[in-house]
Image (cartoon, grey):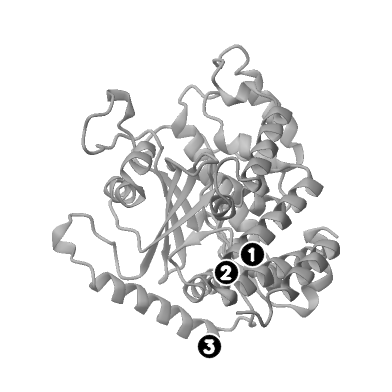
Amino acid sequence: MSFWQFWQREKRGITMLVFALSGTAIACTYFWFRSVPLSVSAVTPRVNSAVDAVLAARNAVALSQDDVQFGNDQTVNILVLGMDSRKEGIEQHCDAIHMVSVNTKDWTVLVTSVPRGTYAYIPPGNYNDNEYYLSNACAFAGIDYGVSQIERVVGVKADYVATVGFSQLLGILRTIELPTTESLQWLRTRQAYKIGDPQRSKNQAVFLKDVALKLLEGDGIPDVVFRMLYRFVDTDMSESTARALYDGLLLHTIRDRPHDIALVMKPHYDVKEIHFDPENASEQIDALLAKLRGRLNSFDLANRTIDDVQHDLGVYLENVLDGKEGSISDVVSQQLWLQVEDEGQREAFQYRYTEAYALKLNESNNAAAVQYVADYILEKHTLGLLVWEMKGRALLEGFVGKK
């Protein structure tokens, strides 16, 4: 059963919602849900509480030590980063950069996009001249330093940071039934445009807005998939705060006010608003790739076939399980199995890593191992994957009651 079929089957008896505003790894996507019916009386206290919590956190920061301001008291700023990290988990580049600012007074949204190639100083200052840009600031000096440089470009501090990697984005795309390969190609392509990286950044922002508007339709999507999708996003924003923000956006029908989700870019570039067409994704991507033939060098990954990449990924995942390279915890952290296109192989790898990771975790923390496997079971139950759900249940029996 597909996700959307499941949605239609369950929609009548379930009221919930999802918050989606994120970058990619390209680009990323944010998801949050609620499990109670919307009403003004229910939403207002939650929204006020969430905003109060943000303001309290701001007051704890010594602003006098920095010239970057948070912005007005009604706006919550969420920095969304798409992380381009290799399978070994080193040098995480901030390759999609979008500051999402939600105004809780008039319920509008401002998405400020920053091209990854924007200049940034990187300590200790001994890099090549062509390496001083924001994506590398995250990779060479750490995420915290990269975030501080992004805040200076945007002109406001982030109240929260949300990151999504390649694997997590693929999981999100599959869940909302967007084509994975074509969507990633669309979000990552820059060489096909004369202006390059700024147009890619704009494409990402347009993509995020289109997805958000779609997921804000009607009653949203079932809350039974909340935990599965929420796990795709690494964020310091609490679930309750995310729910409050989304409740406000849904209640104030921003879906019917698309112009109130404004897209800007810093620094400014003259770029076009181009929409991804999931119904004709192959044709759209083929047209882009046609512009690149003969222009990419031999070291560019785009010159390799998908089969080549999938083969290498499968070999790497097997080698990690065999202890030949990498670490199981790194693969689990990045959920690398999500990059496997074949569903059968993907599910098999996920189960094997779930088993290996849970067994290791159980040696020191039984409760954590039980919770990890329980989350796996819930995910498979939600997707209607009965065989894998039952394998998860059998695995869980080995941990329950053991210390």
When the figure is inspected, residue 55 is found, relative to residue 207, above or below; the finding is: below
Which residue is rendered at x = 61% and y = 25% of the image? 302
Write down the residue under mark 1: 359
Q: Position of residue 146 (x, y in %)?
A: 33, 46
Write down the residue under mark 2: 363
**Looking at the image, is mark 2 or mark 3 earlier in the sequence?**
3
Q: Amino acid at mark 2?
A: Glu
Q: 190 and 395: which one is in front?
A: 395
The picture quadrant where one finds residue 198 is top left
Rendered-image quadrant of the C terminus: bottom right
Rendered-image quadrant of the N terminus: bottom right
Q: Position of residue 226 (x, y in %)?
A: 64, 69
Q: Is residue 329 left or right of residue 359?
A: left
Q: Position of residue 369 (x, y in %)?
A: 61, 70
Which residue is rendered at x = 61% and y = 36% of the image? 186
**Looking at the image, is mark 1 or mark 3 earlier in the sequence?**
3
